[in-house]
Image (cartoon, rainbow, N blue to C red):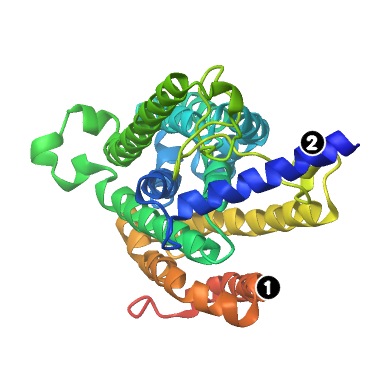
Amino acid sequence: RAGSAESSCSRHHQKKAIRDATAGASGRLAAGPAIAVLSVTLSESMLSSVLFPFLPWLVRDLGVPADSVALYSGLLSSAFNVSSLAGAVVWGRLSDVHGRLPVLALGLGSNAVSMVLLGLSASFPQAVAARLVAGCLNGNAGIARAAMREMTTEETRAHGFGLMSLAYGVGFFLGTNIGGLLAQPAELVPSLLAGSLLDRFPYLLPCAIATSGGLLSLLLVLRQLRLELRQQRTRERGRGRSGSRAGRTGRDTDPLVEVGGASRGEGGEGGLRRPSPSPGHGAGSGRGSGSSRPSEGFALCVLAQFGLNLVIVGFEEAYSLFCASRPSGLGLGPSDISASLTPLSLSLLLWPLAFPRLERAIGAAACFQQGVSLFLLASLATPLLRTIPAGRS
């Protein structure tokens, strides 16, 4: 027990050193690692939101009867989430062992390929298969949040997660506009695209454009990975020349990159290496003390995240169907749905600017509770849009 406590204390100081080095002397996030993680959040948001404006039309054009479009739209959307239930846990565990950046890069690559396959789908089973593959091979949302937490201190955490919310808002804005404006391009310019590949696959163009954002994020992640591998080799050569290899202390571990058989106590300032668990933090502390039982706070966080995702994802899917359907809905087209989502996109862009101050004023728990309450009220009020005259809505 004494040895375990000493090891746990060592990991606690190691993790504190990681955060201090990543935040820098000025208390700010290191630019390279932060840009890599934020680009992942932006691309994930863009790739998921690009489907919202045209999902009902995609399902219809894949041969689904009109009276079953809502059901099959839900099945297609849930395919990603169902397959990611197991995938997210596996990839999160692998990122603990091998580092955040390699796993993020794999998720970005698989998401890009699956999105193009979705745009090239000629049948509903093919589209479902593409979404299943995307979910199985991608756990980037949770890994990116874990990475941001490891790169921030208590003082900079609200700022770091505010930037993640900003990146999500930018991705949502780009994704919904790409999906709404570029879907069915042959109907917009038939003289140029009639009979072309984009006419045969009317949703390939928005999927491909959104994929380009994911590929850009992949390049940024790979660049950061290459830089940190180079820094690690330089440090290892320096330790070899000085003869201090046997005296490694692990004080400079990079939180998101673990390479091959490298020692789990190596790294550099501001890096993205495999994190070290600290005592008193849920499952991480359990592993360090010989117990894998999660804390009560961890279980409550998981439960709250489940309920929040259930409401948000359900509303997002129902909103597209409500806007597209006739006569029970609004009867809007993809571009109109995209335009209707613009206020939501703007709020996602503005919220990160207000969150740090609000979090300091009332606390994170109160922000969560009041935010969920307002979201539920807005969701319940959405069907009332049908009461607005068509000329005004």
Res 242 quadrant in image: top left
Residue 297 visible within the image: yes
Res 205 quadrant in image: top left
Report x, y in % for residue 255.
54, 40
Res 231 quadrant in image: top left
Task: Give above or below for 141 relative to 132.
Answer: below
Task: Give above or below for 352 relative to 181.
Answer: below
Q: Nearer the viewer, residue 147 or 350?
A: 147
Q: Nearer the viewer, mark 2 or mark 1?
A: 2
Which residue is at 50% across, 32% downward? 257
> Which class describes the residues within 10 Å of circle 2: few (<14), some (14-19), or many (20+)?
some
Look at the numbered disc 1 and give the secondary structure of its residue: helix
Look at the numbered disc 2 and give the secondary structure of its residue: helix
The residue identified by callout 1 is 369
Q: At label 2, which amino acid type do we have?
A: Arg
Report x, y in % for residue 121.
40, 26
Report x, y in % for residue 338.
35, 59
As drawn, the label of residue 287 is 2
If the image is split into quadrants, where does the N terminus sit? top right
Which residue is at 52% across, 45% downward? 144
Task: Give above or below for 351 relative to 9.
Answer: below
Report x, y in % for residue 10.
71, 41
> Which class describes the residues within 10 Å of circle 1: few (<14), some (14-19), or many (20+)?
few
Q: CA distance from mark 2 to mark 1?
A: 31 Å
Q: Nearer the viewer, residue 282 or 367?
A: 282
If the image is split into quadrants, where does the C terminus sit? bottom left
Q: At label 1, which amino acid type do we have?
A: Gln
On screen, residue 61 versus residue 82, left or right, reads left
Residue 290 visible within the image: no
Q: Nearer the viewer, residue 68 or 119?
A: 119
On screen, residue 163 versus residue 78, left or right, reads left
Which residue is at 58% across, 53% downward? 313
